């Protein structure tokens, strides 16, 4: 049986920390004093107000596709497993698990003191119900393709679940962080019920989402300090900054360098890479983007370093493929230099493709994300140098999800692919038959690489295959892979406990006031 003390899942997530001290003695004394002060001054209870730039798309965790929504609602729901700051899988509802030698059977032992927010006990039947729903084994379409690999789910006892896969799948273990729902309850879009550290209290469309402390949380070491959390919907970043200045907001989970300057020493910040890929996605099935010469020309015309300097104010890592260096084990170095900015070469490639004078290109951008809007504006100026006339089309994120993500009705777009805990979940986005391959990249050789990686059991072999896949995306200019922007969280003075993860995750149970 697997224990959670070791390396349940290997993922290296690097954060650079600069320690400055006058002397070892002074540093130690300062650390001891700070620890003592925190222990003495940590206050119980209170409310924390968090500014969110996007609207809730769906309170039901199986229907939501928006990262921000999932980050908020992650505090309402728990899965069999969870992740820590290093990306390792840790116990949640499951206390242990075992994987058969052939890699097909996963047996989970559940904790026996877990209750849902309505007071009902969480048992193996709830896990079975949830996974059958996700996998489409209950007669409906699969909610998530991650679970299509499941052949059957059994509950031999109240606190044991046995999941049998159709074939070996190296990515399945990380998929077990998805929420467990109470069996036969389907009103999560209006009144969600989970087993997490916070309970759903109220949602006002376009205004706020309110969560309250779960006093009966099964992990008594993680019962929240805060009594209440208010997520305030504030699409305009300047409004969020002004609200923080006036004391109406306590946390901005993503703030720019300019915003930090405006708030000055009234805030404390936490910053780290996001394991995100910001890209200019190119629809490979529309003209003229179906021509590799055109896609390469666009890559050569874009100056990523300039975008990072202007939009991220230097707080970003340049990328060359759809993968962040924060996942170092699987990261292929050097691809960021595949397309050094070269206007003359870009014009030459466009001429070879039959577009010596350039062409018109529609660039769809979700208006809710100012970072992507700013990126689009810089790219518009850069592409104009090679005759590509860009028309920026702004739309709300909910519409973007429908038109672009679901229906691939677009030419190009700026978006951020959020980090995952397994490289397969990141790179499968370009597999030909993947449901949401909205880039519409099709390559049988690439498909085979991803399939081979999924079946591999040796980590070194998996890493090599994933690196080949990244190289292929870069060489074929599947899109323009720009950067992994750092995420900086701004908190009011006296608020502490915010942690950074290789996926966007809000650890609200750890937040506390010290003053």
Image (cartoon, rainbow, N blue to C red):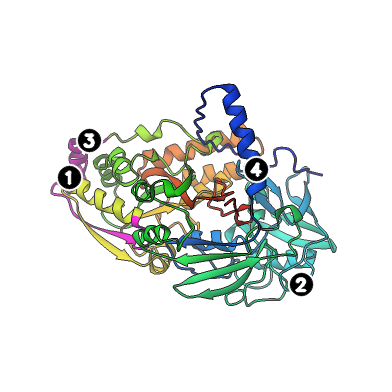
Q: Which residue is mark 2?
A: 119
Label 4 element class: loop
Q: Nearer the viewer, residue 405 or 82?
A: 82
Q: Earlier in the sequence, mark 4 or mark 2?
A: 4
Q: Earlier in the sequence, mark 1 or mark 2?
A: 2
Mark 3 and mark 4: span between their CA atoms?
Answer: 41 Å
- Residue at horizontal 48 percent and vertical 37 percent from the top: 325
Q: Are marks 3 and 4 in contact (CB under 8 Å)?
A: no
Label 2 element class: loop
> Would residue 358 be found to the left or right of residue 30 on screen?
left
Q: Which residue is mark 3?
A: 342
Q: Nearer the viewer, residue 356 or 512?
A: 512
Q: Position of residue 175 (x, y in %)?
A: 63, 53
Q: Nearer the viewer, residue 53 or 257?
A: 257
Front disc: 3 or 4: 4
> Would residue 355 be found to the left or right of residue 473 on screen?
left
Q: Which residue is mark 1?
A: 386
Residue 345 shows in the view: yes
Residue 494 part of the magenta segment: no
Q: Identify the image quadrant of the N terminus.
A: top right
- Residue at horizontal 60 percent and vertical 23 percent from the top: 25
- Range of magenta residues: 341-370
Q: Position of residue 12 (x, y in %)?
A: 58, 36
Q: Quadrant of residue 149?
A: bottom right
Residue 363 part of the magenta segment: yes
Q: Quadrant of residue 34?
A: top right
Q: Earlier in the sequence, mark 1 or mark 3?
A: 3
Label 1 element class: loop
Q: Which residue is mark 4?
A: 88
Q: Quadrant of residue 196?
A: bottom right
């Amino acid at each position: 049986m697997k224990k959670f003390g070791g390396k349940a899942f290997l993922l290296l997530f690097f954060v650079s920390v600069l320690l400055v001290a006058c002397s070892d003695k002074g540093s130690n004394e300062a650390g001891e004093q700070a620890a003592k002060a925190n222990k003495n001054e940590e206050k119980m209870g209170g409310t924390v107000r968090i500014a969110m730039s996007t609207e809730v798309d769906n309170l039901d965790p199986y229907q939501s596709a928006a990262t921000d929504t999932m980050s908020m609602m992650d505090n309402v729901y728990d899965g069999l497993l969870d992740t820590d700051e290093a990306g390792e899988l840790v116990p949640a509802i499951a206390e242990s698990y075992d994987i058969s030698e052939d890699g097909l059977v996963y047996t989970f032992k559940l904790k026996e003191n877990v209750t849902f927010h309505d007071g009902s006990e969480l048992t193996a039947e709830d896990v079975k119900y949830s996974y059958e729903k996700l996998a489409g084994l209950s007669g409906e379409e699969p909610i998530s393709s991650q679970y299509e690999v499941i052949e059957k789910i059994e509950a031999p006892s109240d606190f044991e679940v046995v999941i049998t896969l159709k074939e070996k799948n190296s990515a399945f273990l990380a998929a077990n962080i998805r929420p467990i729902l109470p069996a036969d309850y389907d009103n999560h879009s209006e009144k969600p019920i989970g087993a997490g550290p916070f309970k759903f209290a109220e949602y006002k469309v376009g205004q706020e989402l309110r969560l309250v402390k779960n006093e009966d949380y099964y992990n008594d070491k993680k019962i929240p300090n805060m009594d209440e959390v208010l997520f305030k919907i504030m699409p305009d970043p300047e409004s969020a900054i002004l609200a923080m200045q006036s004391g109406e907001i306590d946390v901005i989970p993503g703030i720019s360098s300019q915003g930090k300057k405006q708030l000055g020493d009234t805030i404390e910040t936490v910053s780290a890479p996001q394991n995100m890929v910001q890209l200019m996605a190119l629809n490979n099935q529309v003209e003229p983007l179906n021509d590799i010469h055109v896609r390469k020309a666009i890559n050569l015309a874009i100056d990523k370093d300039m975008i990072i300097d202007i939009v991220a104010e230097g707080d970003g890592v340049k990328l060359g493929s759809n993968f962040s260096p924060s996942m170092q084990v699987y990261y292929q170095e050097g691809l960021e230099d595949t397309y050094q900015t070269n206007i003359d070469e870009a014009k030459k490639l466009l001429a070879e493709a039959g577009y010596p004078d350039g062409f018109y290109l529609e660039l769809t951008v979700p208006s809710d994300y100012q970072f992507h809007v700013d990126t689009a504006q810089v790219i518009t100026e850069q592409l104009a140098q090679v005759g590509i006339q860009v028309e920026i089309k702004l739309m709300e994120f909910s519409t973007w999800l429908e038109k672009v993500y679901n229906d691939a009705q677009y030419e190009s777009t700026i978006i951020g692919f959020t980090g995952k805990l397994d490289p397969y979940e990141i790179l499968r986005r370009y597999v030909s038959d993947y449901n949401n391959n909205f880039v519409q990249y099709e390559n049988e050789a690439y498909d085979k690489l991803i399939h081979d990686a999924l079946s591999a059991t040796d980590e070194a072999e998996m890493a090599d295959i994933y690196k080949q896949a990244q190289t292929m995306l870069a060489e074929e200019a599947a899109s323009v892979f720009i950067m992994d922007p750092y995420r900086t969280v701004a908190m009011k003075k006296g608020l502490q406990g915010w942690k950074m993860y290789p996926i966007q995750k809000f650890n609200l149970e750890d937040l506390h006031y010290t003053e």
